[in-house]
């Protein structure tokens, strides 16, 4: 069994995107190659976190600690323990789950064998790694970055976007239910967003506009007028399904 670094394992509801409100077991894998200015889990950007917080009982909010690294079989055992009858899927999130490589693949494959759907939350920074895990994924939420997110240096943004598009394409080709999520800032430019949506429209995936929740270096979010202009821009760009969904888990005070 492969070993890897995990930040948290817990039961809650999905707070973002098209499946907001659905119950999931979350496996937050540690390590991320990006540096978004609104990151709300900066403690999990580093891979070598010492401890993994594991919920004692599903929905209890009480945690115990397990020392990292964990074996994929250990993670799967905790997933099964926290699984409830109303579960929609197991969310592999982060950090960035793709960077966990074979460790994430093993967790996903164990879930597949147990008939537990896998929901991959990814920033799409590696099409190569997406190819390794995609056959065990049922749902994919690909977080498409805009230049103002400052996830990478400005000269590397187009390369990152190409990887994100590649991940969406790979997921779609393999029959994964896929959507793109784009975080909107107060500074988001309509013309850049339109250009991004033109490319996404060719992939025929729904696009979720997520108004940023102030965190990190972000102090305020976009107003309604900007969100509506972005929604119109997505439709003009050819996106067939566009939705504005805030982070409902933040509204409810959940993780």
Image (tube, grey):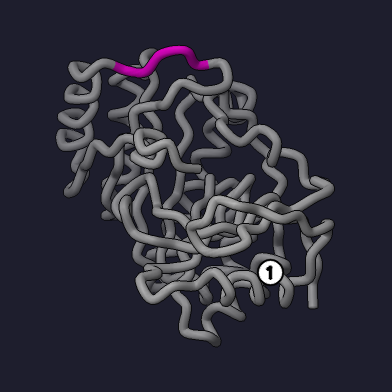
List x then y, in percent, for residue 160: 56, 39
Q: Nearer the viewer, residue 76 or 168?
A: 76
Magenta stretch: residue 219 in it? yes
Q: Where does residue 218 sit, x and y in percent of width and height?
A: 50, 16
Q: Is residue 133 above or below residue 188?
A: below
Residue 129 appears in view = yes
Where are the magenta residues, as a range?
Answer: 218-222
Tell me where residue 138 sits by quadrant.
bottom left
Tell me if residue 128 can be seen.
no
Residue at (64, 23) in percent of width and height: 153
Q: Is residue 202 left or right of residue 66?
A: left
The single residue placed furthest to the bottom in the displayed view is: 113
Position in image of residue 75 (x %, y %): 68, 69
Total marks in image: 1
Horizontal relation, residue 251 to residue 127: left or right: left
Kindly identify the residue that appears in the image at 32 percent across and 51 percent down: 20
> Is the residue 207 above or below the residue 112 in the image?
above
The image shows residue 236, relative to residue 187, as above or below, that is: below
How crowded pointer 1 is (Cα within 10 Å; few <14, some 14-19, many 20+) is rated as: many
**Residue under numbered circle 1:** 75
């Amino acid at each position: 069994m492969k070993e890897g670094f995990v930040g948290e394992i817990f039961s809650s509801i999905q707070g973002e995107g098209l499946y907001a409100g659905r119950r999931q077991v979350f496996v937050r894998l540690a390590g991320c190659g990006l540096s978004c200015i609104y990151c709300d889990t900066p403690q999990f950007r580093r891979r070598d976190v010492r401890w993994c917080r594991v919920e004692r009982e599903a929905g209890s909010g009480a945690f115990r600690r397990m020392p990292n690294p964990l074996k994929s079989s250990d993670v799967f055992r905790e997933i099964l323990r926290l699984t409830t009858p109303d579960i929609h899927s197991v969310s592999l999130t982060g950090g960035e789950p793709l960077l966990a490589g074979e460790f994430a693949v093993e967790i996903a494959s164990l879930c597949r064998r147990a008939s537990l759907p896998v929901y991959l939350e990814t920033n799409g920074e590696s099409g190569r790694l997406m190819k390794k895990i995609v056959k065990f994924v049922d749902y994919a939420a690909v977080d498409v970055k805009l230049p103002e997110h400052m996830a990478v240096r400005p000269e590397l943004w187009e390369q990152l976007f190409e990887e994100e598009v590649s991940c969406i394409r790979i997921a779609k080709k393999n029959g994964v239910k896929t959507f793109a999520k784009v975080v909107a800032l107060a500074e988001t430019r309509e013309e850049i967003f339109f250009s991004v949506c033109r490319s996404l429209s060719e992939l025929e995936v729904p696009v979720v506009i997520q108004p940023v929740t102030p965190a990190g270096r972000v102090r305020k979010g976009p107003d309604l007028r900007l969100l509506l202009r972005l929604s119109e821009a997505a439709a003009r760009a050819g996106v067939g399904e566009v939705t504005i969904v805030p982070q409902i888990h933040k509204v409810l005070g959940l993780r």
